[in-house]
Amino acid sequence: MNRESLKDVREGVRAVLPFLLAVAPFGLVFGVTASAADVAIVPAWASSFIVFAGAAQIAIVDVMDGGGIPLVAFVTAVVINSRMLLYSADFGRYTAPFPWRVRLPAAYLLTDQAYLMMSQRYPDPGDAPRAIPFYFGAGVALWCEWQTTTTLGIFLGSTVPTSWSLEIAVPLTFLALLVVAVHNRPTLIAAIAGGAVAVAAHGLPYGLGLIAGALAGIAVGMLAEERSTAAARSQP
Amino acid sequence: MTMWIVVVAAGLATFGIRLSFVALFGRFSVPARVEQALRYVAPAVLAALAVPGFVAPNGSIEPFNLFVPAAVLGGLAAWKTRSVAAAIAVGLPALWLFQWLA
């Protein structure tokens, strides 16, 4: 790596610093939740580097703790992470000039924050020689922080009394991610349908209510989008 | 043991998703219909995860429990600031206050 690339790596680390503050409570919540839940703690801890995706990790612990079947926990995690297909489709244009020994770790580090920051800073994949070192700086910083805060949360978790009602931190985390994901009418309708169906189907065994809510929300969101584009087209 | 299987399977699948188009040299794009569905994954799944956590905190549905007003305040804080930390910093003390008042 030459000196210019090192500068880009450092810039990536610097650019991600404000996000590290936002990610810290998320990591702590995962750790505390995992240690309080009725799940094997070592694989729950290891999911921080095996899965390395916060919302999916919390969902796995949530489903397994609620007596859900392992298949539902797995499917939920895959559905949550399926949004990364979109990132991968765009990110693949940046990694194309690089060899496998760069592409494999780059794919492993792909997260909402690292990808979005890189694509905002370097919208043109032609800038890949600068964008990829920048991305690695941001990605590795996020990875280190995620391992540190989730591990810390697991140690803290056993010392937190249940009277603190910390279990509300998990849905609050999902809610905070949700209000960012809702940015127009169809996404709002998808969220309302997803939440309503998940509550209505809450009695279903194995955590299937969650899958029902997710699928209903996606379908209703797509319908709402088609209706709004059709309405826009019929207007002069 | 089941937790290990779930975590390793989810990890492999997640890596597969991340690698998918990176492995294809970014030469192909996502079909339009799939891309449209993926746009609604985040709002649908996050709502399906969050809402039952507030409405049924102890497993059975209780629409008038103290988690609900705490969630409203935490949600407002998140909407204003776009931050997970703010949602927890407002929602959790709000819940303590409601529990103390009740």
Image (cartoon, coloured by chain):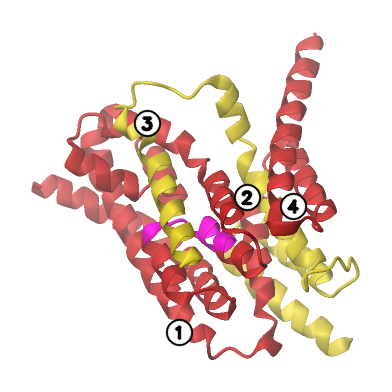
Chain colours: A red, B yellow
Circle 3 residue: B21
**Residue A142: image location, x then y, percent:** 37, 60
Vertically, is A101 above or below B67? above
- What distance separates the C-alpha of mark 3 from that of mark 2? 25 Å
Image depth: mark 4 or mark 1 in front: 4
Q: Main secondary structure of the magenta part?
A: helix
Circle 2 residue: A180
Q: Amino acid at mark 2?
A: Val
Q: Earlier in the sequence, mark 4 or mark 1?
A: 1
Q: Amino acid at mark 4?
A: Gly
**Residue A107: image location, x then y, percent:** 33, 44
Q: Is the same chain shared between marks 4 and 1?
A: yes
Asked where in the image residue A163 lies, by quadrant, the reply is bottom right
**Circle on res. A155:** 1
- What distance separates the C-alpha of mark 2 from that of mark 1? 30 Å
Depth check, front residue: A205 or A226 = A205
Circle 4 residue: A209
- What distance separates the C-alpha of mark 1 from that of mark 3? 37 Å
The reply to whether residue A50 is visible in this rendering is yes
Instruction: Indicate left or right for A142 with A175 as reference.
Output: left
